[in-house]
């Protein structure tokens, strides 16, 4: 078995009972989407092994579960890759990618310093969009005991900043705070195309969600 296949079976086992949005299915989708972007974008310029290992290992130790310690991911990845006798250059590249990916401080946009990192960041962001992204957002919200939305302050797609601020922190708000902004933050053209479709699907979903909620609010029973 090669290194990528060994990493796949290791993570499949390690993440099999994970339910916070970073399950094995997420890692596998990010891996597959990264290869798709690589093929569409830079098949000869990016290192396929670094993209594959970085995509698979990118959430090995998520910062939310490590109290802001962003060295936990690179450390865990390095330990695993050393056990496979991976060369030092590849280990360094994967660790740098994971470190840059997990930096989410102070609303600052994360600049990725390598093409491999840009590809995996796009794939990770794409997995927060579309039908899968919607499912992940609501499952994460449930995990954090958040309300789906605040019926007292039903948001709509063209709300003002003031209307927005009046709402409490709900899963629907996460769409406005983050998910609807991701389409314009893709690094690669291939990802931008995929993001466009997924973005439109989320907007359709939100319109229906609000329409159904309004209907319920105004129904006289
Ligand atoms: P990743 O590490 O995969 O880049 P995050 O850890 O930021 O992503 O989030 C994992 C999933 O949980 C994503 O699908 C994201 O949209 C969702 N999520 C993160 N924060 C929130 C939130 N406050 N409300 C709802 N969903 C969230
Ligand atoms: Ni991820």
Image (cartoon, grey):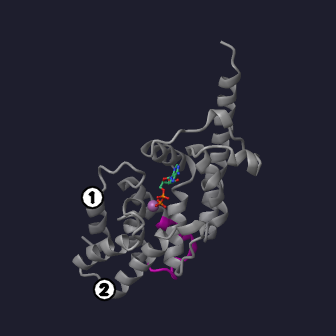
Give how far apart the Cα atoms at labels 1 and 2 are.
Answer: 23 Å
Residue at the spot x=60%, y=54% of the render?
Answer: 179
Q: Is 104 left or right of 180, judged from the image as shown?
A: left
Residue 62 image point, x, y percent? 39, 63
CB contact under 8 Å: marks 1 and 2: no
Which residue in the protein does label 1 denote? 14
Which labelled disc corresponds to residue 196? none
Q: Is 16 left or right of 42, judged from the image as shown?
A: left
- Asked if the magenta segment contains residue 86, the reply would be no
- Asked if the magenta segment contains residue 35, the reply would be yes
Give the quarter of the figure containing the N terminus: bottom left
Span colored in magenta: 34-47
Does the beta carbon of the residue at mark 2 sit less than 8 Å from ligand 2?
Answer: no
Q: Dot 2 lies on which element?
A: loop
In front of the other: 43 or 182? 182
In front of the other: 92 or 73? 73
In the picture, residue 53 is in which quadrant?
bottom left
Residue 195 image point, x, y percent? 62, 58
Q: Dot 1 lies on which element?
A: helix
Q: Is residue 197 above or below residue 94?
A: above
In front of the other: 144 or 129? 144
Residue 160 image point, x, y percent? 77, 48
Q: Is 20 left or right of 187, judged from the image as shown?
A: left
Which residue in the protein does label 2 denote? 87
Residue at the spot x=37%, y=48% of the render?
Answer: 19
Q: Which dot, 1 or 2, sits closer to the camera?
A: 1
Q: Is residue 136 above or below residue 152?
A: below
């Amino acid at each position: 078995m090669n290194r990528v296949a060994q990493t796949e079976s290791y993570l499949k086992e390690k993440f099999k009972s994970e339910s916070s949005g970073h399950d094995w299915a997420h890692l596998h989708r990010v891996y597959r989407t990264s290869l798709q972007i690589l093929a569409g974008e830079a098949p000869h310029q990016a290192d396929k092994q670094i993209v594959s290992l970085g995509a698979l290992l990118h959430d090995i130790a998520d910062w939310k579960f490590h109290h802001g310690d962003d060295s936990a991911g690179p450390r865990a990845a390095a330990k695993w890759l050393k056990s496979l006798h991976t060369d030092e250059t590849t280990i360094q590249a994967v660790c740098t990618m994971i470190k840059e990916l997990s930096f989410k401080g102070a609303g600052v946009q994360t600049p990725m310093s390598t093409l491999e990192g840009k590809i995996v960041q796009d794939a990770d962001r794409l997995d927060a969009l579309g039908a899968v992204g919607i499912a992940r957002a609501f499952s994460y919200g449930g995990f954090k005991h958040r309300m789906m939305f605040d019926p007292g302050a039903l948001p709509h797609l063209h709300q003002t900043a003031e209307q927005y601020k009046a709402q409490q922190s709900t899963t629907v708000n996460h769409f406005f705070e983050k998910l609807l902004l991701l389409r314009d933050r893709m690094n690669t053209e291939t990802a931008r195309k995929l993001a466009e479709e997924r973005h439109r699907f989320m907007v359709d979903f939100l319109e229906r969600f609000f329409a159904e909620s309004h209907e319920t609010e105004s129904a006289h029973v």
